[in-house]
Image (cartoon, rainbow, N blue to C red):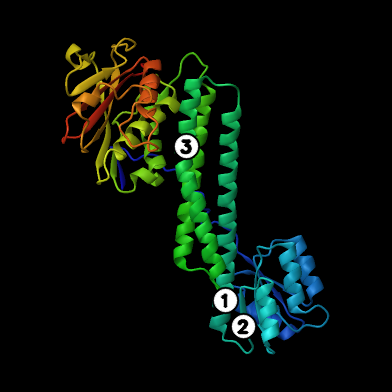
Amino acid sequence: MVAIHSSATPSPLRSAIVSEASAPRPTLLVVDDEDGPRQSLRIVFKELYDVVLASSGTEALEIAKSRRVDAAVLDIRMAGMSGTELLGHLKNLDPRIEVVMLTAYETPDTLRQALRQGACDYLNKPFEITVLRDAVANAVKRRTLNEAMTDGSRRVQELQEELRKQQLQGEMARSQNEIYASVMHDIGSPLTAVSVMLQMVSMDLEATRGGAPHAVKEQLDRVNLQVARCMEISRRYLNYARERSTQRQAVRLNQVLTDVRELLRSHPSGKRHQLSVQLMPADLTLRMNGTDLIQVLLNLITNAFQASPNPLHVEVFGEYLDDAVPPAALADSPCSAFANRESFVNEPPMIALRVSDNGPGIPNQVLQKIFESYFTTKAPGEGTGLGLAIVRRLVSQAKGGIRVESEPGHGTTFTVFLPVEVG
């Protein structure tokens, strides 16, 4: 469970779902070679949809070629091209068109043929108006859901391609390769969840004849919102990555804290834990690369998540410092260690950014080694020992310092000291 608190409400991310109120009315194509049934269906549906009439299969295809058609109601027995033949042609023209078949002469063969070619429903004449209304409404919903699912899949593919291109651009030093590979991995976690959810929605749609349940629509809305958030967050930090060579770098702290919260919503390690992220009352700007800062926080938080198989509470919060860090806080003790002491520029104003958990704590004999590369207490295959070493290197590059305080049985707190941009 993830919570975030602030004295001011953050600006909401733009939703990926267009509101139904602002969307144009769906187009319903009615095809029957008799004028009476055509006009009757127009009267039934004219208040709900943009109804277009066709008296033959040929005329219906010309309409479908010239404009968008969301759903169609086809009579099976028509002179010339039958409704079943027209169904096949419409699906070849646009597979997303959802079709309801009508017939007064149902046979097992026509039913199987219609369903095999993609009809979403099949009604016998005479039919009840309410039943037909429901069938058409479900057909339109299926069209909307399929389009949203397709759009979500396209967004995921675009983002994955952008991430792949970024990874391939230029040659990186070994340390940078470690950093960016880890960044892409953490961003990939929610994208993987999105892909799985899209597959589940697709399976639900395939298994649902006559319309999709309301729960599927709600699930798809959440999927598309998550995709939009991932795209916005990922592109922002890819831009930071491209700007690493600039001489002076800065990032808004509250934006990073909000993005960390969003990225960890779907992280596998965080499902059984509670994360609380506290925004700063004033949105400070830090002198640090944005990609580096988000990686520092992701590593520290996921490190806390993995500290215990039992549910933990992890808190992230900051403190503005008007004074230098006192010498006592820079010294090591049996229950604390300070990294980057040599490169740390201890000059205010600074932010003390803390990641604190109520986990089992770190044994005293281990505490002084945790920032060393490849040092890990995890079982073989469960950890690389690079997470905290990367944190130390990134904080050092920003002229910051990092302090860890831990006592077995009483949790752990990492405090990252970083310079604040003035003016």
User: Dot 1: few (<14), some (14–19), or many (≥20) neighbours within 10 Å?
Assistant: many
The label on residue 185 is 3
Rendered residue at 66%/66% (across/down): 97
Taking depth in this image into account, of 167 and 151 the one nearest to the observer is 167
Q: Could you tell me how many numbered marks the image carries?
A: 3
In the displayed structure, 281 sits above or below 95; it is above
Residue 150 visible? The answer is yes
Q: Residue 108 appears at what percent x and percent y?
A: 67, 86
Query: From mark 2 to mark 1, how far is it between C-alphas?
Result: 9 Å
User: Dot 3: few (<14), some (14–19), or many (≥20) neighbours within 10 Å?
Assistant: few
Q: Amino acid at mark 3?
A: His
Q: Residue 372 appears at what percent x and percent y?
A: 34, 21
Rendered residue at 42%/25% (across/down): 292
* Pointer 1 residue: 135
Q: Amino acid at mark 2?
A: Leu
Q: Earlier in the sequence, mark 1 or mark 3?
A: 1
* Pointer 2 residue: 123
Rendered residue at 53%/63% (across/down): 203
Query: From mark 1 to mark 3, how far is it between C-alphas?
Result: 44 Å
Q: Amino acid at mark 1?
A: Ala
